[in-house]
Amino acid sequence: MGMLISEDLIGSLNETARAAHEDEFGALGRKLERRGVDIEALVKRAMAWSVAVPTWGVGTGGTRFARFPGKGEPRNIHDKLADCGVIQQLTRGTRTVSPHIPWDKVSDYNALRQEAAQDGLGFDAVNSNTFQDQADQALSYRYRSLANARSDIRAQAVAHNIECIEIGKAFGSPALTVWIGDGTNFAGQQSLSGMFENYLKAMEEVYAALPPNMGLFIEHKMYEPAFYSTVISDWGASLMAAQHLGPQAQCLVDLGHHAPNVNIEQIVARLVHVGRLAGFHFNDSKYGDDDLDSGSVDPFRLFLVVNELDEAEQRGAKGFDPAYMIDQSHNVTDPIESLMASAVEIARAHMQASLVDRKALSEAQEANDVMAAHRTLKAGFLTDVSPILAEARMRQGGAYDPIAAYRASGYRDRVAQERPEVKGAGGGIV
Ligand code: PSV
Ligand code: MN
Ligand code: MN
């Protein structure tokens, strides 16, 4: 068991907040009752919700200019699991972690699965990494990986992905997520169609190694690290690849991987329609793949995306079973605090979306009553669902205020005594 938070501390902090919470929960319950909504059903729905934490998110991220490590940085996957365990213990809405290989490489993945289970954690999708070179690697990915013009480099990238599938089997992961940085920086550097064809051929081999119960999640990103062209730059290329490969291949949407102002909720609707929505990497952004905390820049956009997911779920869209994951980089906050705040914001969007009166909305849409439709949708967003989220956390043993409980616990100072300070100004991860 990792160095988690004292249950007595959580309990006593919750008791301190109890009277105010009950007052606010009661008032919200009465308000929702007037709308014909049962708060109890919403609490149950909130309790069932979970989003996966990225193992790479608990370390301090960085930009290509610098990385400023914090106190008590996790040294390895074991420390990362302990930190993820704290996030789950306090929020009760992050029951799985999404690992990245080889960043989380160990010799015994079955043992790691047991270790995670002791902290109340399971594994979500495994992420492969052919966007960097590793010390023990024979061939460089300088000119990229699965779409490389050289077949020996493509083969190395395929072998890595197949290894990740094996690791995923040991973890009980539902999927392998493949994001590649492949593309070009110069016009003429490579054949645009040739690169896509090379990618498809390589991915056919990866796909062939999947067990029947594992998905292959294709993650698109508009640009970066390649700045002239990117092989899987958008959901069109991603969907083409998924349809080419077969039914186990699906498209993963990372909220930061689009041009500014792109209507991401509509992309969600299209992928749901075609039964290929793999899931999400949640984060927020203002300019590009900023990897800021979910809901910190544009909570309404987060709501609109989650609303689309809720709508698909409520109407029982065929094959709809997306994986929800966070993908953020924390540069100026304690990553545990950022991840807890983000998990709460995503859960909030889920509750707000659950509050949308779908019947009233479709009636207003049918009548072409634009204002009624918009107000019906917005009523969900405008409801303060905090008491429902707090109730769902506390009923499961979590904290009324996860960040306050975390600060009161002194966890970071405690682990800092075991985890040596990391010095130096390296570039960050993407
Ligand atoms: C790439 O920008 C990305 O969103 C992919 O999901 C990577 O696996 C992750 O960030 C971490 O670099
Ligand atoms: Mn991502
Ligand atoms: Mn990204």
Image (cartoon, rainbow, N blue to C red):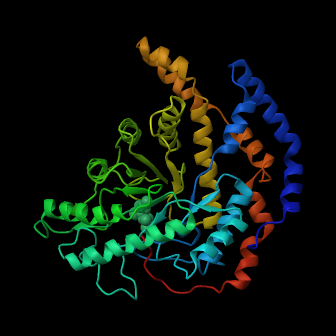
Up the image or down, 20 lies above or below 8; here it is above
Up the image or down, 321 lies above or below 375; here it is below
Q: Position of residue 245 (x, y in %)?
A: 29, 54
Split into quadrants, the picture shows ligand 1 in the one at: bottom left
Q: Position of residue 79 (x, y in %)?
A: 65, 76
Q: Is residue 227 left or right of residue 7?
A: left
Q: Is residue 282 left or right of residue 287?
A: right
| Quadrant for the N terminus in the image | bottom right
Residue at horizontal 55 percent and vertical 66 percent from the top: 57
Tell which of 410 and 254 is nearer to you. 254
Tell which of 62 and 177 is nearer to you. 177
Q: Position of residue 257 (x, y in %)?
A: 37, 54
Q: Is residue 129 visible?
A: no
Residue at horizontal 30 percent and vertical 63 percent from the top: 203
Up the image or down, 126 lies above or below 253; here it is below
Q: Is residue 320 left or right of residue 200?
A: right
Residue at horizontal 58 percent and vertical 26 percent from the top: 379
| Quadrant for the C terminus in the image | bottom left
Q: Is residue 412 left or right of residue 197?
A: right
Q: How many numbered marks, from 0 up?
A: 0
Q: Residue furthest front?
A: 212
Q: Position of residue 49 (x, y in %)?
A: 63, 45
